[in-house]
Image (cartoon, rainbow, N blue to C red):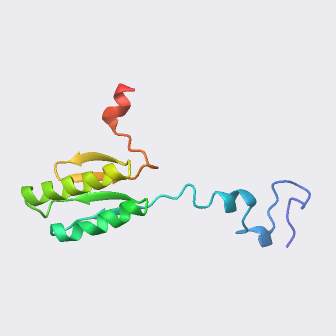
């Protein structure tokens, strides 16, 4: 099959080159990846999974809708202490939904954006 463009043009892509990595992609492959873990625990005993995720530099969205107020408060208090130890941040999204982020992630809410 003949191509309209010859291989001398910079924007010509050879099929053999597709999917190969460049020095830039190899160096920064993991620098921009972010993982978000969404948890909906049924009891306080399941909250240790959130601590493991935070220690692994993953963001955690915690949905506490299945828990009563006292148990949900206990979970938030426990994770707030854990996030403080790793210099992370926490943001309340809804009455029983929170996002916990490690130190290398930033949470920007609409309220914060309006003031800056």
Pick whichever, 57 or 93, lies toward us.
57
Examine the image and state in which quarter residue 52 appears: bottom left
Q: Nearer the viewer, residue 37 or 45?
A: 45
In percent of width and height, residue 109 lies at: 34, 39
Q: How many marks?
A: 0
Q: Which residue is rendered at x = 24% and y = 46% of the image? A: 92
When asked about the image quadrant of residue 30, the answer is bottom right
Q: Quadrant of the N terminus?
A: bottom right
Vertical position of residue 25 compared to residue 95: above or below: below
Residue at 30% x, 64% y: name it.
Answer: 50
Left or right: where 28 falls relative to 2: left
Residue at x 15% of width, y 60% of height: 65
Q: Residue furthest top?
A: 115
Q: Which residue lies most toward the front here?
A: 85
Locate the C terminus by quadrant. Answer: top left
In percent of width and height, residue 96 lies at 17, 53
| Image coordinates for residue 61, horizontal then vertical, percent | 30, 57
Closer to the camera in the image, 114 or 87: 87
Q: Position of residue 32 (x, y in %)?
A: 55, 55
Which picture quadrant has residue 14?
Answer: bottom right
Q: Is residue 4 left or right of residue 38?
A: right
């Amino acid at each position: 099959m003949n191509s309209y463009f010859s291989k001398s043009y910079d924007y010509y892509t050879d099929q053999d080159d597709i999917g190969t990595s460049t020095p830039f992609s190899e160096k920064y492959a993991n620098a921009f990846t972010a993982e978000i873990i969404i948890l909906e625990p049924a009891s306080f005993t399941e909250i240790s999974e959130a601590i493991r995720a935070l220690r692994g530099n993953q963001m955690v969205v915690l949905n506490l809708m299945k828990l009563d107020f006292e148990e949900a408060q206990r979970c938030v208090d426990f994770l707030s202490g854990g996030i403080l130890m790793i210099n992370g941040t926490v943001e309340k999204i809804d009455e029983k939904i929170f996002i916990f982020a490690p130190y290398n992630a930033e949470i920007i809410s609409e309220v914060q954006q309006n003031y800056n």
